[in-house]
Protein backbone atom coordinates (compact mmCIF):
# COMPACT_ATOMS: atom_id res chain seq x y z
CA UNK A 1 0.00 0.00 0.00
CA UNK A 2 1.30 3.42 -0.90
CA UNK A 3 1.77 5.63 2.12
CA UNK A 4 2.89 9.22 2.42
CA UNK A 5 6.28 8.06 3.77
CA UNK A 6 6.83 5.65 0.86
CA UNK A 7 5.82 8.40 -1.55
CA UNK A 8 8.22 10.87 0.05
CA UNK A 9 10.99 8.28 0.13
CA UNK A 10 10.75 7.78 -3.62
CA UNK A 11 9.95 11.33 -4.62
CA UNK A 12 11.33 13.76 -2.06
CA UNK A 13 10.83 16.62 -4.47
CA UNK A 14 8.12 17.33 -6.99
CA UNK A 15 10.69 17.47 -9.78
CA UNK A 16 11.69 13.83 -9.27
CA UNK A 17 8.05 12.77 -9.45
CA UNK A 18 7.52 14.86 -12.58
CA UNK A 19 10.59 13.32 -14.25
CA UNK A 20 9.40 9.78 -13.48
CA UNK A 21 5.88 10.57 -14.67
CA UNK A 22 7.15 12.02 -17.95
CA UNK A 23 9.45 9.02 -18.54
CA UNK A 24 6.58 6.61 -17.88
CA UNK A 25 3.99 8.38 -20.02
CA UNK A 26 6.27 8.92 -22.99
CA UNK A 27 7.95 5.53 -23.19
CA UNK A 28 7.97 4.33 -26.79
CA UNK A 29 6.80 0.73 -26.31
CA UNK A 30 3.05 1.47 -26.33
CA UNK A 31 3.42 3.62 -29.47
CA UNK A 32 5.36 0.89 -31.23
CA UNK A 33 2.68 -1.67 -30.34
CA UNK A 34 -0.07 0.65 -31.64
CA UNK A 35 1.82 1.13 -34.92
CA UNK A 36 2.30 -2.63 -35.23
CA UNK A 37 -1.42 -3.15 -34.65
CA UNK A 38 -2.36 -0.48 -37.22
CA UNK A 39 -0.06 -2.07 -39.80
CA UNK A 40 -1.70 -5.46 -39.20
CA UNK A 41 -5.14 -3.79 -39.35
CA UNK A 42 -4.29 -2.16 -42.71
CA UNK A 43 -3.06 -5.47 -44.11
CA UNK A 44 -6.17 -7.30 -42.87
CA UNK A 45 -8.51 -4.66 -44.32
CA UNK A 46 -6.65 -4.69 -47.64
CA UNK A 47 -7.28 -8.43 -47.84
CA UNK A 48 -11.00 -7.63 -47.89
CA UNK A 49 -10.39 -5.44 -50.97
CA UNK A 50 -12.22 -2.29 -49.89
CA UNK A 51 -12.08 0.86 -51.95
CA UNK A 52 -9.46 3.37 -50.84
CA UNK A 53 -12.23 5.53 -49.36
CA UNK A 54 -13.61 2.61 -47.36
CA UNK A 55 -10.13 1.76 -46.11
CA UNK A 56 -9.55 5.37 -44.97
CA UNK A 57 -12.86 5.34 -43.10
CA UNK A 58 -12.16 2.01 -41.40
CA UNK A 59 -8.56 2.89 -40.64
CA UNK A 60 -9.28 6.31 -39.12
CA UNK A 61 -12.11 4.87 -37.05
CA UNK A 62 -9.88 2.10 -35.69
CA UNK A 63 -7.02 4.50 -35.01
CA UNK A 64 -9.28 7.00 -33.21
CA UNK A 65 -10.70 4.19 -31.06
CA UNK A 66 -7.21 2.91 -30.22
CA UNK A 67 -5.96 6.35 -29.20
CA UNK A 68 -9.09 7.24 -27.22
CA UNK A 69 -8.93 3.86 -25.49
CA UNK A 70 -5.36 4.49 -24.36
CA UNK A 71 -5.32 6.50 -21.11
CA UNK A 72 -1.63 7.32 -21.58
CA UNK A 73 -2.26 9.28 -24.78
CA UNK A 74 -4.61 11.65 -22.95
CA UNK A 75 -2.07 12.21 -20.19
CA UNK A 76 0.67 12.79 -22.77
CA UNK A 77 -1.45 15.50 -24.34
CA UNK A 78 -2.06 17.11 -20.93
CA UNK A 79 1.66 17.21 -20.19
CA UNK A 80 2.55 18.53 -23.65
CA UNK A 81 -0.03 21.27 -23.19
CA UNK A 82 0.80 22.08 -19.57
CA UNK A 83 4.59 21.84 -19.85
CA UNK A 84 5.47 22.62 -23.49
CA UNK A 85 8.90 24.05 -22.60
CA UNK A 86 9.90 21.31 -20.18
CA UNK A 87 13.11 19.77 -21.60
CA UNK A 88 12.06 16.16 -20.91
CA UNK A 89 8.58 16.66 -22.38
CA UNK A 90 10.15 18.15 -25.50
CA UNK A 91 12.73 15.34 -25.68
CA UNK A 92 10.16 12.57 -25.34
CA UNK A 93 7.67 14.23 -27.70
CA UNK A 94 10.45 14.57 -30.28
CA UNK A 95 11.32 10.88 -29.85
CA UNK A 96 7.66 9.96 -30.38
CA UNK A 97 7.46 11.95 -33.58
CA UNK A 98 10.77 10.52 -34.81
CA UNK A 99 9.27 7.06 -34.31
CA UNK A 100 5.79 7.88 -35.60
CA UNK A 101 6.33 9.73 -38.84
CA UNK A 102 8.72 7.34 -40.59
CA UNK A 103 6.55 4.35 -39.61
CA UNK A 104 3.37 6.07 -40.79
CA UNK A 105 5.16 7.10 -43.99
CA UNK A 106 5.95 3.44 -44.70
CA UNK A 107 2.36 2.37 -43.96
CA UNK A 108 0.95 5.10 -46.24
CA UNK A 109 3.40 4.18 -49.00
CA UNK A 110 2.46 0.51 -48.78
CA UNK A 111 -1.26 1.29 -48.89
CA UNK A 112 -0.83 3.63 -51.88
CA UNK A 113 1.25 0.99 -53.64
CA UNK A 114 -1.56 -1.52 -53.13
CA UNK A 115 -3.85 0.89 -54.99
CA UNK A 116 -1.17 1.64 -57.64
CA UNK A 117 -0.94 5.27 -56.56
CA UNK A 118 2.16 7.41 -56.31
CA UNK A 119 2.86 10.81 -54.85
CA UNK A 120 2.30 14.11 -56.60
CA UNK A 121 5.50 15.99 -57.43
CA UNK A 122 7.06 17.75 -54.45
CA UNK A 123 5.25 15.61 -51.87
CA UNK A 124 7.02 13.03 -49.68
CA UNK A 125 5.60 10.19 -47.63
CA UNK A 126 6.80 12.02 -44.52
CA UNK A 127 4.66 15.01 -45.62
CA UNK A 128 1.67 12.68 -45.92
CA UNK A 129 2.36 11.13 -42.50
CA UNK A 130 2.73 14.55 -40.88
CA UNK A 131 -0.52 15.88 -42.38
CA UNK A 132 -2.52 12.78 -41.52
CA UNK A 133 -1.11 12.70 -37.98
CA UNK A 134 -2.06 16.33 -37.37
CA UNK A 135 -5.61 15.62 -38.56
CA UNK A 136 -5.92 12.58 -36.29
CA UNK A 137 -4.41 14.41 -33.29
CA UNK A 138 -6.80 17.34 -33.70
CA UNK A 139 -9.83 15.08 -34.12
CA UNK A 140 -8.86 13.01 -31.07
CA UNK A 141 -8.54 16.14 -28.93
CA UNK A 142 -12.02 17.19 -29.99
CA UNK A 143 -13.41 13.66 -29.55
CA UNK A 144 -12.24 13.65 -25.91
CA UNK A 145 -14.65 16.46 -25.03
CA UNK A 146 -17.54 15.70 -27.40
CA UNK A 147 -20.21 13.19 -26.50
CA UNK A 148 -20.90 12.58 -30.19
CA UNK A 149 -18.25 11.95 -32.84
CA UNK A 150 -17.74 15.12 -34.89
CA UNK A 151 -18.99 14.68 -38.44
CA UNK A 152 -19.17 16.71 -41.60
CA UNK A 153 -22.49 17.74 -43.13
CA UNK A 154 -22.29 14.62 -45.33
CA UNK A 155 -22.19 12.41 -42.23
CA UNK A 156 -18.52 11.56 -42.88
CA UNK A 157 -16.35 11.43 -39.77
CA UNK A 158 -14.22 14.53 -39.40
CA UNK A 159 -10.89 12.71 -39.67
CA UNK A 160 -11.88 10.49 -42.62
CA UNK A 161 -13.44 13.45 -44.43
CA UNK A 162 -10.34 15.61 -43.96
CA UNK A 163 -7.98 12.88 -45.14
CA UNK A 164 -10.18 11.98 -48.12
CA UNK A 165 -10.33 15.66 -49.08
CA UNK A 166 -6.51 15.88 -48.96
CA UNK A 167 -5.77 12.71 -50.93
CA UNK A 168 -6.17 14.21 -54.44
CA UNK A 169 -3.63 16.93 -53.63
CA UNK A 170 -1.12 14.37 -52.31
CA UNK A 171 -1.54 11.33 -54.55
CA UNK A 172 -1.65 10.94 -58.32
CA UNK A 173 -5.28 9.85 -58.42
CA UNK A 174 -6.35 9.42 -62.06
CA UNK A 175 -8.64 12.15 -63.42
CA UNK A 176 -12.31 11.38 -62.99
CA UNK A 177 -11.65 8.83 -60.24
CA UNK A 178 -12.73 9.22 -56.63
CA UNK A 179 -11.24 7.46 -53.63
CA UNK A 180 -14.40 5.35 -53.51
CA UNK A 181 -13.78 4.07 -57.04
CA UNK A 182 -10.17 2.98 -56.44
CA UNK A 183 -9.62 -0.67 -55.60
CA UNK A 184 -6.55 -2.76 -54.80
CA UNK A 185 -4.25 -3.62 -57.68
CA UNK A 186 -1.23 -5.02 -55.81
CA UNK A 187 -1.97 -7.64 -53.11
CA UNK A 188 1.60 -7.88 -51.80
CA UNK A 189 1.07 -5.59 -48.76
Image (cartoon, helix red, strand yellow):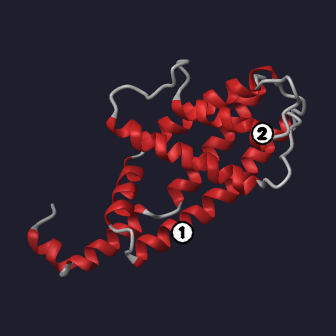
Q: Which secondary structure, mark 2?
A: helix
Q: Is residue 124 left or right of residue 17?
A: right
Residue 94's disc is 1
Residue 12's disc is none
Residue under label 2, please give it: 111
Residue at 42% from the left image edge and 45% from the top image edge: 70
Rendered image quadrant of residue 15: bottom left
Residue at 75% from the left image edge and 21% from the top image edge: 180
Q: Is residue 124 left or right of residue 56?
A: right
Which residue is at the front of the view, 173 or 61? 173
View extreme (left): residue: 4
Residue at 46% from the left image edge and 72% from the top image edge: 90
Work out whether 161 lies above or below 130: above
> Residue 114: x, y in percent?
84, 36
Work out whether 19 lies above or below 166: below
Q: CA distance from mark 2 to mark 1?
A: 26 Å
The image quadrant where one finds the C terminus is top right
Q: Which secondary structure, mark 1?
A: helix
Which residue is at the front of the view, 40 or 56? 56
| Local crowd size for mark 1, using a 10 Å CA cut-off: few (<14), some (14–19), many (≥20) | few
Disc 2 or 1, which lies upstream in sequence?
1
> Residue 115: x, y in percent?
84, 33
Assess whether mark 1 and mark 2 are in contact (beta carbons under 8 angstroms).
no
The image quadrant where one finds the N terminus is bottom left
> Residue 124: x, y in percent?
78, 55
Work out whether 66 lies above or below 101: above
Residue at 50% from the left image edge and 47% from the top image edge: 137
Rendered image quadrant of residue 167: top right
Q: Is residue 78 left or right of residue 183?
A: left
Amino acid sequence: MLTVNIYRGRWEHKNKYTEDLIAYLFRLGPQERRLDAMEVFAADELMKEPSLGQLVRQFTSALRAAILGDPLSGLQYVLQTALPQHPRVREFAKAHYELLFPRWAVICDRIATAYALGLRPGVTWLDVALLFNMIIEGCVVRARVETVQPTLSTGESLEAGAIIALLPSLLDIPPGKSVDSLYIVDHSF
